[in-house]
Amino acid sequence: TATFAAGAVAQSQSAKLTSETIARRGLGAMSSGIDLRPVVLYNPSMLSVNFMVPGIIGLIMQFQTLLLTAFAVVRERERGTLEQLIVTPIKTWELMLGKILPYTVIASVAGIGILIAGRVLFGITVVGSLGLLALLSVLFLLGSLGLGLLISTVSQTQAQAMQMALFIMLPSILLSGFLYPRETMPVIIQKLGLLVPLTYYLQILRGIILKGVGIDVLWQQVIPLALFSLAVFTLSAWRFQKRID
């Protein structure tokens, strides 16, 4: 929004100088031609908070599920209690579900809380379908949980898990469009951002919350996000079962 506003001011000053130059040369009767007036369809007030709040939802949800899931398993391994869980009658998938389900609930509550805070504090309402938003959020959480579980299978200590989580989170913050529109980035950076799942989820969030679009528009983001989530979660579940066995 700041870039757009700066461009609008520059365009206005340029038009003013052009008009003054024409008037000095005695060409005031001439028409200036096409009058360009930009119309902002979404976020017409150009408030940065409308752009940032959906981004914060995605970032917090990924951070909580990724980090807490990784820590949950590694902490058990450090304390030596993971072996005690393994010898119990519970199945591997039950153990895995017990590790990821609480953090799914925590991340969901955090996302809903930020959404409510955005409505109360800044007047940001969900223009699109809440049901579609919830469904695609679960899809995103599946991928984040898979990443956290995958980190837990290759980390021996919580320090290693933290380093690997930050290695994933930092590119997500910089390349996903969380801080500024991806359209303003160099082309090579935009291409790298396509490897980050948060990129697709932020586009989904802003599309549903601010624009009110549906799956007919968002399918280009939904398909790669679904493929990533299913692939990572399947790989992490296989690694977790292999590690437990």
Image (cartoon, rainbow, N blue to C red):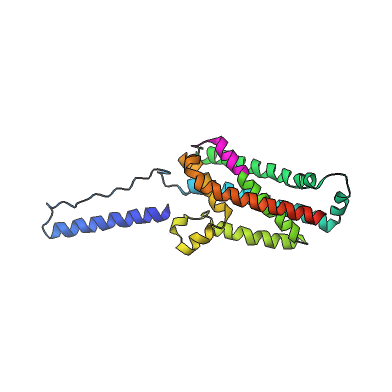
Q: Is residue 91 positioned above or below 176 on the image?
A: above
Front residue of this view, candidates 37 and 102? 102
The answer, for residue 101, to whether it is visible in the render is yes
Residue depicted at x 38% and y 53%: 5
Q: Which residue sits at x=68%, y=61%? A: 164
| Residue 162 x %, y % | 70, 60
Whether residue 13 appears in magenta in the rendering, the answer is no
- Left or right: 89 as drawn, with respect to 186: right
Q: Is residue 29 left or right of residue 159?
A: left
Name the residue rendered at 77%, 61% in the picture: 157
Q: Can I make out residue 66 in this image?
A: no
Q: Quadrant of the C terminus?
A: bottom right
Looking at the image, which is closer to me, 31 or 186?
Answer: 186
Image coordinates of residue 84 in percent, x first then y, are 88, 51
The residue that appears at 78% across and 55% down in the rendered structure is 242
| Residue 18, quarter of picture | bottom left
Predominant secondary structure, magenta span: helix
- Magenta highlight range: 127-138
Residue 63 drawn at (x, y percent): 64, 52
In the rendered image, residue 4, in percent from the top left (x then y), is placed at 38, 53
Judge left or right: residue 11 versus residue 129.
Answer: left
Relative vertical location of residue 135 with respect to residue 21 in this rendering, above or below: above
Q: How many marks?
A: 0
